[in-house]
Structures are given as structure tokens and as C-alpha cells.
Image (spheres, rainbow, N blue to C red):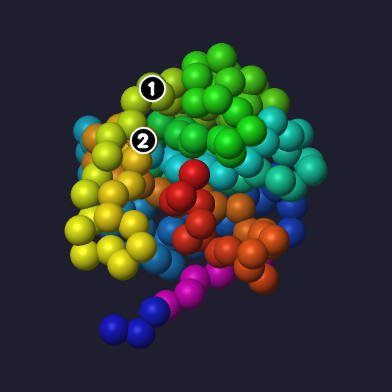
Amino acid sequence: MKPTVYAVRCERYDQVEEKAAELLEMMGGIARYVTPGETAALKVNLLSASDPEKAVTTHPAVTAAVGRQARKAGAEPVIMDSPSGAYPHTKSALTKVYRTCGMEEAAEHAGLGLNFDTRSEAVSFPEGKLIQHFEIMAPLLEAGAILNLSKLKTHALMTMTGAVKNLFG
């Protein structure tokens, strides 16, 4: 199967709601990815406690738009991340990052949950060549769906990380 890339032009954040719905329809509709009653983890990229306009993190308008679509399909969307190593994975650190990045306000306006569960679980991967286990956020393992809302950006070790690296945070 050939990979497919979907894209829509969105020039302003006040268009995100409409454009996210259009993009998800192109991808087969949100119901292809979530089911009624399940927790849908909105895995954002919150590298640091930065104002959304600095473009360091997933924008809250994008998170809210996708979350509203998941809620319309009957899922229970919850914003989740484990911010960079600069922050301890604690409720107080998550509160600061969610608030500064605009996720707290996005959750309130879109009717989304915010994850404060800091548990992790070791997951075995014996066939790995370098790594045979991963520590994964327990709420992600328990979610019925994970919607990867990465931030398109570069990294010191890569030209562009795309959406892959977001799942390592």
C-alpha cells in the first residue's frame, strides 16, 4: 500500500475548525479513527511552556478543532503529553505547560479533558536492535485511539521530524 499524504491550506487560525473538518473528511472521516465511548488521546507536542504564537508547540486551535470532531463522533477526547526533559512529569508541571501553551483554555472551550495522570508502563519490544523496551505513558496505553497532533518543525538531529518524533515525548 502506498502512503497517502493529505493536506489543506489554512492561512489563519480562525479557519482551523473548518479546515480540520475538511481534512478529516478527506481522510475518511473522524469515525474511521475513533469510536463512541472510547478515550481519544489528543497527543500534542508541548516541548516547553511557550505562548502559542511562538510556534514551538501544537497550536491550541488545532487541538480544539480535532477534539471537537472526536467528540462529535462520540469519543471522549483528552489532551495528553509528557513535555520535554526540562520539566518533571508531575501534575504541577503539566498544569503550567497546559496553561502557558493555551491547552487549558482550548480544553475548556471545546469540552476536552486534560490528562494529569503521570503513570508510565514498560512495554517490551524484544525484536528491537538497540532498544528492547519503552516507557510509555499509561494513559496512552489505556486510550482507545491516539490522534497524533504533532508540530511541524525541525530538530538539531534531523532536517524535519514530521509526526514520528511526537510519539517519543
Name the spot of residue 105 as percent of width and height, x first: 62, 24
Name the spot of residue 159 as percent of width and height, x first: 67, 71
Of all residues shown, which one is farthest toward the top? 92
Upstream in sequence: badge 2 or badge 1:
1
Image-based side of 137 in relation to 150, left or right: left
Q: Tell me the chief SS of the magenta region.
A: loop
At 58% across and 38% down in the image, what residue appears? 84
Q: Determine which residue is flagged by label 2.
A: 137
Dot 1 surroundings within 10 Å: few (below 14), some, or many (20 or more)?
Answer: some
At 44% across and 51% down in the image, what residue appears? 167
Q: Determine which residue is flagged by label 1.
A: 117
For residue 121, above or below residue 147 = above
Instruction: Please check the rendered image and state whether residue 7 is part of the magenta-colored stretch, yes or no.
Output: yes
Please report the bounds of the magenta region as a residue range: 4-9
Mark 2 and 1 residues: CB-CB less than 8 Å, in contact?
yes
Of all residues shown, which one is farthest toward the front? 130
Dot 2 surroundings within 10 Å: few (below 14), some, or many (20 or more)?
Answer: some
Look at the image and tell me whether residue 66 can be seen: no
Image-based side of 79 in relation to 132, left or right: right
